[in-house]
Structures are given as C-alpha cells and as structure tokens.
Amino acid sequence: MNTLSPTGRTRIRRHSERGRADRQDLYDVLDAGLICHLGVVIDDVPHVLPTGYGRDGDTLYLHGSTGARSLMAAAEDVEVCVAVTLVDGIVMARSVFNHSMNYRSAMVYGRPVSMVSDEEKLAGLRAVVDHLAPGQWDVLRPTNRKELAATSVLALSLAEASVKIRTGPSADEEDAPGVWSGVLPVRQVFEPPVPDPELPGGIAVPAHVAARVTR
Ligand SMILES: Cc1cc2nc3c(=O)[nH]c(=O)nc-3n(C[C@H](O)[C@H](O)[C@H](O)COP(=O)(O)OP(=O)(O)OC[C@H]3O[C@@H](n4cnc5c(N)ncnc54)[C@H](O)[C@@H]3O)c2cc1C
C-alpha cells in the first residue's frame, strides 16, 4: 500500500493541489518531525496535547505516564487525530491576505491500541526513543519492570492519514509597488551537545549524538 487512499475525512478540500498521495511523503513528514499534537475529546472537550512519538513501518507510537489523562482517554477505543507540523518558511506578501507559510504537515486519524505485553511496549518505546535520538536505544541500560509498569504505550495505525505541503512564494498580485515580498526560510537546527554536569570524566559524546549536530 504505497499510496494514501483518501477517506471522507482525509480528502483535502482546501488547496487540494497541496495534498500528497504518496505514502513516502507521510513517512518523510513523520520522520522529520520531533513532536506531534494528539487531539482527543475528554468529557466532551477537545484536548490537543503536544507529545513525542515514534514510527515503525505503518504504526505510530505514543507513550507517557500511565497517569496521563490524555493517553488514558486515547486508549479507551476512541477516535483521535494526531498532527505533525514542520514550518519551512514565512511567506511574506504585499498584502495581508496573501501572507502564508511554507510547511509540510500530516494528520493521522484512528483508534489507538494500548500495548499490553512487555514485548509490545518495548517495541513502541524503542520507536519513540530512536525517533528523538537515533541510535540511543542500543546504548541504554534495559528498562526495568517498575518503569515499564509506569509507562503506557499506544499504537496508532497509519492507515488513515493525509499530507499537505506548501512550497514557493506568495500568490501575490503586484499591486503594492516598493513593498518587499518573498520567503523567510525556517529550519530546525541541532546545536553542539551539552554534557550533563554530573557526568563522570572520560565519557565522550557518542558518535550517534555528535552526528546529529547541524552543520
Ligand atoms: C504551519 C501551518 C500554518 C497554516 N496556517 C494557516 C492559516 O493561517 N490559515 C488557514 O486557513 N490555514 C492554514 N494552514 C492550512 C490548514 O492546516 C488547513 O489546511 C486549511 O485551513 C484548510 O482547512 P480545512 O478544514 O478547510 O481543510 P479541508 O481541506 O476541508 O480538510 C479536509 C482534510 O484534509 C486534511 N488536511 C487539511 N489540512 C491539512 C494539513 N495542513 N495537513 C495535513 N492534512 C490536512 C485532513 O485530513 C482534513 O480532515 C496552515 C497549515 C500549516 C501546516
């Protein structure tokens, strides 16, 4: 299944030309993002929670404390929406109306499933850790039973998702001579790592961490 098959709720209506049907575009947006926003209705009120995530194939994993209300609500066989947003530029126009943003964004709909067995939970946690810090899982001490019991892990299928991407300058008309228009590019950078003050001497920054620093 290499294409995103639009459903009634994932069919992009507004600026449909910005929609992407290739599943790889979905993976690319999810893999490039650091956080997602989990939308879930709790007691008839929509809640939108920023949180970490990870992807393994066509499954998105979310994790958190077993006491986190949003995760508990999302685990109750309810519909959720997860959004990942990457801002690539501020699009400046000659008119207020034509200002915009360049972006890559994804929305995923579905009913998350709560991971129960240790194996399932660990697979989800690995995806989350390696998403934020690729290579980190392999060097960590094993997760203990207490930590595992205190952590809930949810799996959300990527079966129903949409991707929307905007690029390029504004859709400006040249009706304001002398006013600058263009794009102010935005990018996320990783700065050189800062060692923990308690870190014993002689432990160098691992290669997989150093490799992430933006050049
Ligand atoms: C960083 C950023 C800034 C934006 N700023 C604005 C703004 O200021 N004003 C504005 O009107 N719009 C803005 N948008 C676009 C906005 O996300 C919507 O696409 C747009 O408002 C149309 O909404 P709609 O409900 O009419 O979409 P519809 O086309 O009716 O939505 C139908 C379905 O399309 C999919 N979809 C819609 N939008 C997106 C998306 N962005 N990413 C992935 N799937 C999507 C969803 O599955 C949705 O259920 C911005 C988007 C981003 C990422």
Image (cartoon, rainbow, N blue to C red):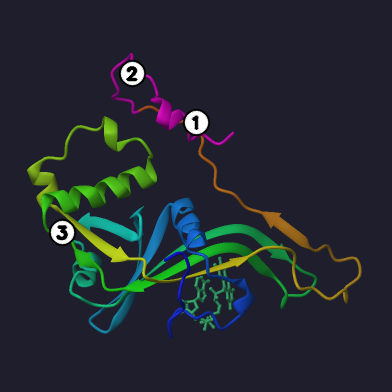
In the drawing, what numbered circle is on residue 203? 2
Q: Which segment did they paint magenta? A: 196-215
Q: Which residue is mark 3?
A: 66
Report the Cα–Cα distance between label 2 and label 3.
33 Å
196, 212: nearer the viewer: 212
* Residue 33 vertical position relative to residue 110 in the rendered view, above or below: above
> Which structural element holds mark 1?
loop
Q: Residue furthest front?
A: 1
Give the residue type that dot 2 points to: Ile
Left or right, 120 with reference to 49: left
Residue at left offset 8%, top offset 45%: 146
Q: Indicate whether 140 appears above or below 87.
A: above
Q: Is residue 27 left or right of residue 59?
A: right
Q: Residue 202, position in %: x, y? A: 33, 14
- Evaluate if marks 1 and 2 touch, with contact meaning CB atoms under 8 Å apart: no
Q: Amino acid at mark 1?
A: Pro
Q: Which residue is mark 1?
A: 192
Location of the C terminus by quadrant is top right
Q: Position of residue 164 (x, y in %)?
A: 55, 69
Category of crowding for the residue at label 2, using alpha-carbon neighbours closer than 10 angstroms: few (below 14), some (14–19), many (at least 20) = few
Q: Residue at x 21, y 72 (%)?
A: 73
Mark 3 burial class by Cα count in 10 Å: few <14, some 14-19, many 20+: some
Amino acid type shown at disc 3: Thr
Disc 3, SS: loop
Q: Is residue 204 above or below residue 101?
A: above
Q: Earlier in the sequence, mark 1 or mark 2?
A: 1
- In the image, residue 211 lies in the stretch drawn in magenta: yes
Residue at point 51% right, 34% down? 213
